[in-house]
Image (spheres, rainbow, N blue to C red):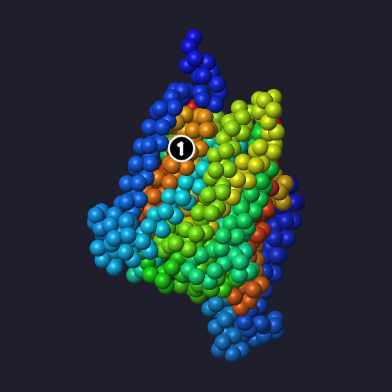
Amino acid sequence: MLRRLWLWSAVLGLGLVGVGLATILLGIPDLTLAQLWGILDGEGTELERLGVYHLRAPRLVLACLSGAALGLAGAIMQDGLRNPLAGPELLGVSSGAATAAAMVIVFRPSLPGYLVPWITLVGGLLSAGIVLAVIAKMGKPSSSAVLVLVGAALSAAFAGALTVVMVLGDQQEFGAISRFMSGSLASIGWPPVQRVLPWFALGLPAALMMGRVLNLLQAGDDIAESKGVRVVRARLFILGLGSALTAAVVSVAGAISFVALAAPHVARRLVGTNDSRLVLPVTALAGALQLSAADLAARLVFSPVEVSVGFWTALCGGPVLLWVLHRHLRGATE
Amino acid sequence: MTATSTLAMDPTIKDRRPLGARRFGLTLVAGLLLLVLLVAWSVMIGTGDISLGDAVRALLGRPSSRLDHTIVIRLRLPRALVGVVAGGCLALAGALSQAATRNALASPDLTGVSAGVVFLTVVAVGFGPSWIYHPDDLLLSPWSVLVGALGGAGAGALVLKLASQRKGDPVRLVLTGVIVGLLLATATSFVLMVWGSSATLEASFWFIGSLNARVWPHWNVLWPWAAVLVPVALAGAGWANLLQLGDDVAVSLGADARRARAGLFVVSATLTAGALVVVGSIGFIGLIGPHIARRLVGGDLRRVLPASLLAGAILLSAADVGARAFTTRALPTGTVTALLGAGFFLILLVRQRSR
């Protein structure tokens, strides 16, 4: 197990370095490695320096951090709720957060940037809270399918609310909000990255340290209780933490789907275990790789047109999701 | 033991009072009255309210002013009619697919059918042969309904296959449908982005479901399909009744269950496509309409189908009137149905589980 962990961590890490280099080098203008050294030494044209330092570098950092955050949010929600399909997008957290972000764009464009993640967090938590309330109302312990369907209903409602907000805004805001709906890293420069950095600095380590609790929760509520875990409180904390990580990502990059759903499953498969302590770090790496590779594809494949990063994450995440669904359904009948 | 109790043992109409033909007739008449009221209201309100008297005079061809004539006949009447027929088609499609799958949650938008319709239609618009797409505002040609129906039936078949419906509980099918729908929606937005032409830009406005700016040309796309498909669907009520009893019973009564199911499913997908091509992706009517209909007239599909038609027409008209009566902005009707429908869906889920 441990050997596979190191092996795959190394592979994913190398992949991440490769994608990172490609992100820095490729685009308009294309650079060579030698040119990059030159730029790091302070040579190169103004345009090249600007491109590397202020466009590509922040974008790469944001892609890696957001990917890791989404992957971890998905992993802790899946293990904590014992539901292979849980994740911010199917629980409605993403769309709640995106609606909140859209409302900021339309109604309070002058709001200071550092407050935006808080607003999106309120949107995300509101949605997660409604999901939990509905589930609690059902009384019986419900199947994971029901949880996802409740989330889907909320997503539909929030999508309606989002359209209302879009209609109330003007044409220019329409474009900005569309970006939020499908997710894009094509902002930005450093300021937005700095804005969410504290969120990642607190949230990512917190999620990575959840391994032991998640293992106990996976083993069942009774076992977890007997080992001193307060199950309800732990679940609420997990939901809050997952929502916070998602909200931070949504506040700068919009609702990017399929990373939180796919990365944890890929990680579990690679490591060959469900032990959260091992899965979580690999999930973070896999998420970072998935999102940064998707962003690279979004920039380059249809260049000069930029395609939303959400499509590329869906392209690799969608099949994983279908596979998980297929296994889940088969398991349900057996 | 009376006749009532034997009827109550029939699984399809369990817990429902057997209703006399008279009560069914009364329900239909009440529904029609409500619909007429809604259409009248729909013609009266908007930018520049028109009194009932003026509206009626304009409708009868004796408008009190030129402006009244333009507003009522050119703008508001076609919009109201499109809403009535599209809503009816959507609810009828929902009732058919719910009967064919024996699943109370199997409406077009929860089984991936709507997403399939939208996806293939957008792809067709992207390729842009002239028989698909008129360069006029938000108008697809009547033939695009066929393309949409193909997409809807394909997506629905995929979902049924993945969920292998006959084994499981109703939630499985919908879970698969929701996820396939999510993937198709992503694919749709990708197509819109890659073919960044003006045609696809208009298509992206089209699929925010709405009755805004629907005028006579839209009506002309919609009504021929409705005129063909609605009678076909209503004629399928006997089959649908058999399927509701379960495949074994249906076969023992001499029906080809597979073929009947496929037939109903295709009619349902085509009805969905016909409505969506004209009004864009308006959700949840196909879920709510049939439920209301069943509550009012019982489980016999010979009654449920016409009642669904009426309920859907009322729902979409009411959503449109509501959207216009309470806001001054041109709120897309689809947002109203999404907000109401999502809540309704949650209630259904809670009920289904806590039973």
| Amino acid type, callout 1 | Ala
The residue pinned by badge 1 equals: B307
Nearer to us in this view, B95 or B36 = B36
Instruction: Residue at 57% x, 81% y: name it.
Output: A51
Looking at the image, residue A313 lies above or below residue A225: below
Label 1 sits on a secondary structure element that is: helix
Please give left or right for residue A88 compared with residue A123 in the image: right
Residue A324 seen in this snapshot: no
Residue displayed at 56% across by 42% down: B233
Residue B297 seen in render: yes
> What residue lies at 51% left-to-right and 43% top-to-bottom?
B92
Whole-percent x and y of residue B137?
48, 68
Q: Which residue is at the front of the view, A277 or B205?
A: B205
Image spot of residue B32 (x, y percent): 38, 41
Return the chain for callout 1: B
Q: Is residue A42 above or below residue B101?
A: below
How many labels, in total? 1
Q: Quadrant of residue B190?
A: bottom right
Q: Residue at x 65, y 86 (%)?
A: A38
